[in-house]
Image (spheres, rainbow, N blue to C red):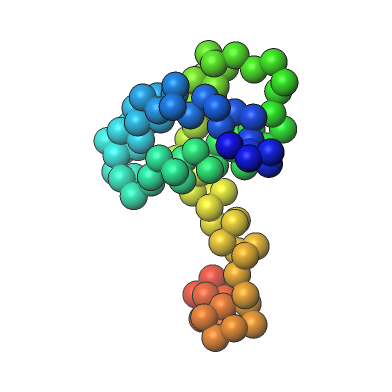
Amino acid sequence: MGSNAHPYEKYREQVRVVLQSKLEEFRLLDYGELSEAQLWEYLLKKKWRKPKEDIHIHEIVRDIFAVKVSDVFHYQTMEQMQSADWFSEEGAEELKKLLK
């Protein structure tokens, strides 16, 4: 774990079963294409972008169980839009699709 690592990264192994449970819930709702890595990235970069210094593991578990699939997909869409090169050929095609 590097110095830039998110402080909650140390809990990932401990809460892996909770992440898997949440992903199973999403699969039951027919959102099976979401991976553990994508869910974890959303939590680190969006939900926990301002980490608490004195976080308890039960708070992390609560946050994972509270995630809505729509929140993760919205986050991913915004990330893709921000990183897209709208002036490339591929970017222009994506922009055309969005504007339809």
Residue 58, image x, y percentages: 53, 13
Residue 96 can be seen in this image = no
Could you tell whether 34 is left or right of 8 in the image? left
- Compared with 36, 93 (above or below) is below
Tell me how many marks there are. 0
Viewer-proximal residue, 10 or 49? Answer: 10
Could you tell whether 79 is left or right of 52 in the image? left
Q: Choose top left, top right, bottom left or bottom right for residue 37.
A: top left
Residue 11, image x, y percentages: 52, 24
Q: Choose top left, top right, bottom left or bottom right for residue 47.
A: top right
- Compared with 40, 100 (above or below) is below
Q: Residue at x 35, y 35 (%)?
A: 23
Viewer-proximal residue, 92 or 55? Answer: 55
- Compared with 65, 4 (above or below) is below
Q: Residue at x 35, y 31 (%)?
A: 20
Residue 48 can be seen in this image = yes
Which residue occupies the extreme front position in the image? 2
Viewer-proximal residue, 88 or 69? Answer: 88
Residue 49, image x, y percentages: 68, 37
Residue 48, image x, y percentages: 64, 33
Q: Residue at x 62, y 75 (%)?
A: 85
Q: Residue at x 57, y 48 (%)?
A: 75
Could you tell whether 47 is left or right of 38 in the image? right
Q: Quadrant of the N terminus?
A: top right
